[in-house]
Image: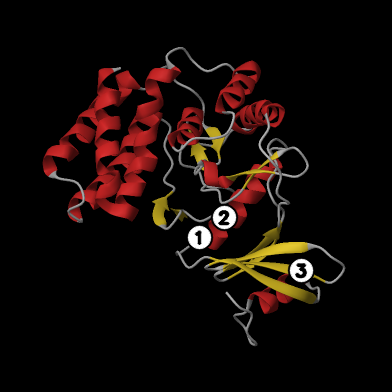
Amino acid sequence: MRDVDGEYGPATVARRLTGRAVTGVRAVSAGIAEVTLRGGPVVIVKRQDAPGGVRAEAAGLRWLAEAGAVRVPAVHGHDGSWLVIDRVPDGRPGAEAAARFGRELAALHAAGAPAFGAPPPGGPRDAAIGLAPMRNVTGANWPVWYAEHRVLPYLRRAVDDGTLRPGEAEVFERVCARLPELAGPAEPPARLHGDLWNGNVLWGADGRVWLIDPAAHGGHRETDLAMLRLFGCPHLDRVLAGYQEAAPLADGWRDRVALHQLFPLLVHVVLFGRSYAGQAVEAARTALTR
């Protein structure tokens, strides 16, 4: 991205939303730029065109910050398709930071939510996870809510798109029918990051872990942890140890990892096609055997 004169350049957006002069712009990736403000602070200016995406992300970051647990970048403002947040200076993964992150993540979850599917205060009902739509419809019963609002919508779209075959879809339908017995002990709604894969976990120069790009909502705490495991995370064993130290997970949680991974895997099937179909089907079959 390069800065342009007028309404739509990242420098112009940064000036408008921070009220400060801009001294430099550096493209990071498509739709994301680092903007240096006068006096030295650097902010991230991000463009997000998904309906409700910017509003949802800003509300999610503020909601996570209110818990006073895991660090998240401060929101300077949002405007239409644009979001301006603090830049997190890069650091290196470390075992001590990982254990601390586990304890902080447990505290974030314990901050709670009004209901499963509850959006952050001020956040839209129709939000997004990555580039996929995500509807925040509330429910009191996690197994029913998870099936109706986190598994089946993406399953139906994948079948409609021809990405999953009817025979493959039947495995997910069997999981949904058995969710009350597969879900484990009932838990209260947790305050979730909601898209907790390794790319959204930043190891800061301050020795702390920072979280970015949330799809925050009320959910089951094991879903965040299962997503963290899905694509790998440095020192994951220390993260889990720190979490267990602060808030032990219910017996059998390891057997439910595949169940909680169905949601992010189906999102990936919808977004990226057959390359994730086999992994998603295998997770559904694994969930049925536990």
Query: Can residue 122 be seen at all in this image of the molecule?
Result: no
Relative to the observer, which residue lies in front, 204 or 192? 204
Up-down: is 212 above or below 31? above
The percent coordinates of residue 121 (x first, y second) are 60, 49
Up-down: is 18 above or below 66? below
Q: Residues within 10 Å of mark 2 (few under 14, many from 20)?
A: many
Q: Is residue 172 left or right of residue 204?
A: left
Up-down: is 104 above or below 242? below
Question: Which callout, 2 or 3, points at the residue further toward the start of the chain?
Answer: 3
Query: Which labelled disc corresponds to residue 36?
Result: 3
Q: Is residue 124 left or right of residue 101?
A: left
Residue beneath disc 1: 53
Q: Residue at x 64, y 16 (%)?
A: 245
Quadrant in which the N terminus appears: bottom right
Give me the C-alpha separation between circle 2 and circle 1.
6 Å
Q: Is residue 222 left or right of residue 132?
A: right
Relative to the observer, which residue lies in front, 278 or 266? 278
The percent coordinates of residue 231 (x first, y second) are 45, 38
Q: Does dot 2 land on a helix, a strand or a loop?
A: helix
Residue beneath disc 2: 57
Q: Residue at x 26, y 18 (%)?
A: 289
Q: Residue at x 41, y 37 (%)?
A: 139
Which image quadrant is residue 42 in? Answer: bottom right
Q: Does dot 1 land on a helix, a strand or a loop?
A: helix
Tell me the kind of residue under disc 1. Answer: Gly
Q: Does dot 3 land on a helix, a strand or a loop?
A: strand
Q: Residue at x 30, y 26 (%)?
A: 179
Outermost residue, top side = 251
Give me the C-alpha separation between circle 3 and circle 1.
24 Å
